[in-house]
């Protein structure tokens, strides 16, 4: 992996992790589904517009169309939709920790569903991840965490895992920014329908809402997704997924810094164990590929 890819991987992890803090700020002043559907409308227009300006084509490969539809529905609408609703009552650090366990769940699902053989290092990583999550959940539940919000985060995690498994190997073929923009539109359509059916829209116009919304549209919404596709195309999905092991650290750190969310010793220990578990799983998969 070259130095440029490493920098891009770290940048992706920071952008991905910061999305939970910005989402927490947004849902304080706006109804979650309305805010998220508006975000995808803005990000989709920007993504497709820039892609067209760069000469990228609407003509995607079948694998790219499959990735566009699946990610648009499962990742953009279901995963983030449930997370936005959850973060009305769940702290950003908690939501980021749950979401960051996705590589562990992908490895477990690959083992159970696709019969992918796990090396001892990967099994140790899965066990470590389970221990880390148990430590954090025990500490947060004893502190009065909203279990309904946690349940919504878990549904989102399952949707993100399913999306990851269903589009394995579907990121090649170019037109990355066009794919990203069209995914945003797919998420917008689903969320707009959900907003009309399930939500009473509300907006309290504040400066913090405007700044968080703009940041979410441009950075985690558009730039981070593009960087991820670029990274997967450059170094492969397995190596790119290694950068997920630093997501728990950035997620809790950004939330503590910008939102002053409490961070206990059991949280720090749990995050460290989860990160090591994710790293072990990814390193094991790299060795298997090699």
Image (cartoon, grey):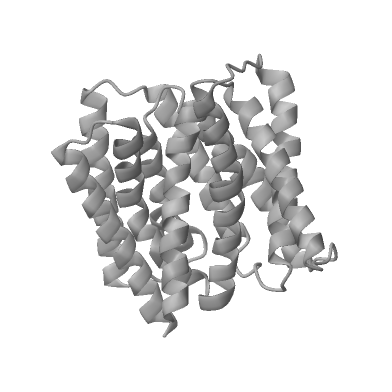
Above-or-below relation of 284 to 49: below
Residue 92 shows up from this direction: yes
- Residue 156 horizontal/vertical position (percent): 51, 39
Residue at far bottom of view: 290
Picture residue at 76% right of the left edge, 37% below the top = 189
Quadrant location of the C terminus in the rendered image: bottom left
Vertical comparison of 96 with 150: above or below: below
Q: Tag count in the figure?
A: 0
Looking at the image, is 76 positioned above or below residue 153? below
In front here: 162 or 283? 283
- The answer to whether residue 152 is seen in the rendering is no
Q: Residue at x 47, y 36 (%)?
A: 22
Residue in view at x 51 percent, y 77 percent: 235
Q: Position of residue 266 (x, y in %)?
A: 16, 40
Camera-side residue: 290 or 86? 86
Residue 164 location (% of width, % of height): 56, 57
* Quarter the N terminus occupies: bottom left
């Amino acid at each position: 992996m070259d130095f440029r890819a490493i920098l891009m991987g770290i940048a992706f992890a920071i952008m991905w992790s910061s999305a939970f803090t910005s989402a927490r700020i947004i849902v304080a002043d706006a109804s979650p589904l309305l805010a998220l559907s508006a975000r995808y409308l803005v990000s989709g227009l920007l993504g497709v517009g820039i892609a067209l300006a760069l000469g990228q084509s609407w003509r995607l490969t079948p694998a790219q169309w499959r990735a566009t539809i699946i990610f648009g529905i499962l990742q953009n609408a279901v995963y983030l939709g449930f997370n936005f609703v959850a973060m009305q009552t769940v702290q950003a650090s908690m939501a980021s920790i749950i979401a960051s366990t996705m590589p562990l769940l992908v490895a477990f699902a690959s083992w159970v569903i696709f019969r992918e053989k796990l090396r001892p290092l990967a099994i140790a990583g899965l066990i470590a991840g389970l221990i880390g999550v148990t430590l954090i959940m025990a500490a947060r539940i004893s502190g009065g965490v909203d279990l309904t919000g946690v349940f919504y985060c878990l549904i989102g995690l399952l949707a993100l895992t399913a999306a990851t498994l269903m589009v394995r190997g579907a990121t090649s073929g170019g037109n990355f920014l066009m794919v990203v923009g069209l995914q945003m539109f797919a998420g917008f359509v689903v969320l707009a329908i959900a907003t009309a059916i399930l939500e009473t829209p509300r907006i309290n116009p504040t400066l913090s809402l405007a700044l968080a919304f703009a940041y979410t549209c441009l950075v985690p919404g558009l730039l981070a997704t593009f960087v991820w596709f670029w990274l997967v195309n450059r170094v492969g999905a397995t190596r790119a997924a290694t950068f997920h092991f630093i997501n728990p650290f950035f997620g809790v750190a950004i939330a503590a810094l910008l939102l002053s969310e409490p961070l206990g010793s059991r949280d720090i220990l749990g995050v460290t164990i989860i990160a090591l578990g994710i790293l072990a799983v990814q390193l094991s998969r790299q060795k298997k590929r090699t």
